[in-house]
Image (cartoon, rainbow, N blue to C red):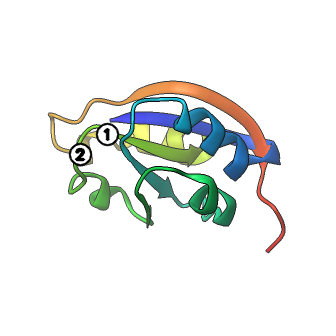
């Protein structure tokens, strides 16, 4: 599983989509980011999930767009995921969500 870490600063959905759209095409997973712009601009299949257990059910590889604090939580609770899931941070983007 590949993770794209998102921190706060500029429109994260657009920046994440631009980065992911240049990578091999895999499922894009929005983990508690809830970005409408990422959903709009992503050229890959896109889903939203809210809990760590849902990650284990996803087809691998996939891109998980996640905030820094959620990544720290995910890494500290990694034992809740099946052993075959591999986490790799591909990139960090400083971004903010657009007001909804």
Quadrant (top left/top right/bottom left/bottom right) for the N terminus: top left
Residue 29 % position (x, y) = 44, 53
Q: Residue at x 54, y 48 (%)?
A: 70
Q: Which mark is residue 81?
A: 2
Residue 64 % position (x, y) = 45, 45
Q: Residue at x 39, y 38 (%)?
A: 25
Rate crowding at label 1 as few (under 14), some (14 to 19) or many (20 or more) other CA atoms within 10 Å: some
Rate crowding at label 2 as few (under 14), some (14 to 19) or many (20 or more) other CA atoms within 10 Å: some
Task: Between residue 63 and residue 83, name the one nearer to us.
Answer: 63
> Helix or strand or loop: what does disc 1 sit on?
helix
Circles 1 and 2: CB atoms closer than 8 Å: yes
Q: Is residue 85 left or right of residue 26?
A: left
* 3 w.r.t. 30: above or below: above
Task: Between residue 98 and residue 76, name the one nearer to us.
Answer: 98
Q: Residue at x 50, y 25 (%)?
A: 90
Task: Between residue 91 and residue 15, name the one nearer to us.
Answer: 15
Give the CA distance from mark 1 to mark 2.
Answer: 6 Å
Q: Is residue 59 left or right of residue 74?
A: left
| Residue 82 location, quadrant | top left
Q: Is residue 94 left or right of residue 50?
A: right
Residue 55 % position (x, y) = 30, 53
Q: Which residue is mark 1?
A: 78
Q: Is residue 25 left or right of residue 14?
A: left
Q: How many circles with numbers are drawn on the protein?
A: 2
């Amino acid at each position: 599983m590949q993770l794209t870490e998102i921190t706060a600063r500029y429109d994260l959905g657009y920046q994440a989509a631009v980065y992911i759209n240049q990578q091999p095409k895999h499922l894009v997973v929005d983990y508690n980011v809830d970005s409408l712009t990422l959903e709009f601009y992503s050229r890959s299949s896109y889903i939203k999930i809210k809990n760590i257990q849902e990650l284990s059910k996803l087809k691998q590889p996939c891109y998980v767009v996640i905030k820094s604090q959620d990544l720290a939580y995910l890494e500290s609770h990694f034992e809740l995921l099946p052993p075959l899931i591999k986490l790799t941070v591909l990139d960090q983007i400083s971004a903010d969500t657009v007001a909804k």
